[in-house]
Amino acid sequence: MTGIKVTPLAFESFGVRSMCTLIETKDVTVLLDAGIALGPRFRLMPHPREFRARDEGRMRIEEAAARAKVVTVSHYHHDHHTPNFVDYVWLGSSQESFERIYKGKIVLAKDSRRKINTAQRRRGWMFRQAAEKLAEKFEAADERTFEFGRTKLRFPAAVPHGESESELGWVLPCIVEKAKEKAFFAPDVQGPVVDETVNLILREKPQLLVMGGPPTYLQGYRIGDEFFRTAIRNMEKILGTIPMVVIDHHVLRDEGWYKFLEPVRKSAEKANHKLLAASELLEKEPDPLECRRQSLYEQDKPSKEFLEWANLPEETRSDKPPPLTT
């Protein structure tokens, strides 16, 4: 694309939980899903490398926010928006980070009153109460279009976070369109695995699609095999039509992510299309860390001070940031 620039800022291929993306046209700069997080895994606290990746990612997000006019929120999981409270352990969030990201911005967010589950309704209400005090404007964006010069930001109806009627609720896609070019941002669709999401993507025919892949690390634990067979079929269909597709997020929490996507990659090659992890859009090798947490602890043993902090009771540990050696 010549009129739309897409820059991934934080994804699993960068070593963190996030799908934060910067999209720029001559008319407007948009920061999509400005959140970042780490997660529990293998009964181990995140490795120091993960904490450093998170802190570096948060810095990139805040620097991008300084340039952005618009900040979007697709849903109210903490890896997709930044709350206004202090969390040293999982989010690296603070009131100061919240202000750097949302102050003076036009915030276009998932409606916290409809098509939303109970937990996110509460988080969404709290986020709106805080963000409205410092944003230039706060708008529920579901099924609305916003124009900035010749650039349109379109938000279709919210789609399922994974399967239909998922307990995880719904997410709000975003389409950035200028002239005949179109970038489609589809976070946490987990494949997608529902026909309505697949059909929406195919109808729109973007030049670039950025979407969340399926959570294969939960296979056989919370999710059955048919879910993943459906995801593969749908991704193959999409890659046969869309010229460039970034698939990242949940799927890269599994060390076998590259092999899992092999049939999808073959479908892309047959159509002369491209399948990429987000880091590859910047010509960088994917570096997922969470899926390698156990081996990181073995190969790059943390300092004594870090291990002492990691072994503190949760309520004590959460009061101070992890001691990271350079």
Image (tube, grey):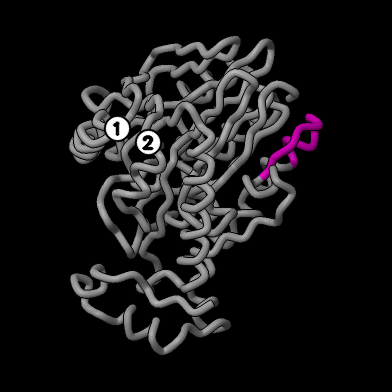
Circle 1 SS class: loop
Which segment did they paint magenta? 266-276
**Count of picture labels:** 2
Q: Describe residue 211's horizontal placement relative to residue 303 as left or right.
A: right
Q: Which mark is residue 134?
A: 1
Q: Is residue 271 magenta?
A: yes
The residue closer to the viewer here, 189 or 56, is 56
Which residue: 29% across, 49% down? 95
- Are the residues flagged by discs 2 and 1 in contact, CB closer than 8 Å? yes
Residue at x 53%, y 19% (from the top left corner): 199
Q: Quadrant of the N terminus?
A: top right
Tell me the number on the disc at residue 313.
none
Neighbour tally class for label 1: few under 14, some 14-19, many 20 plus, Cα within 10 Å: some
Q: Is residue 22 above or below residue 302?
A: above
**Which amino acid, mark 1?**
Leu
Secondary structure at badge 2 equals helix
- Give the x, y percent position of residue 290: 49, 64
In which image quadrant can residue 240 be found? top right
Number of the label disc, if any, that sits on residue 102: 2
Residue plotted at (60% across, 35% down): 235
Residue toward you, 181 or 266: 181
Q: Is residue 198 left or right of residue 260?
A: left
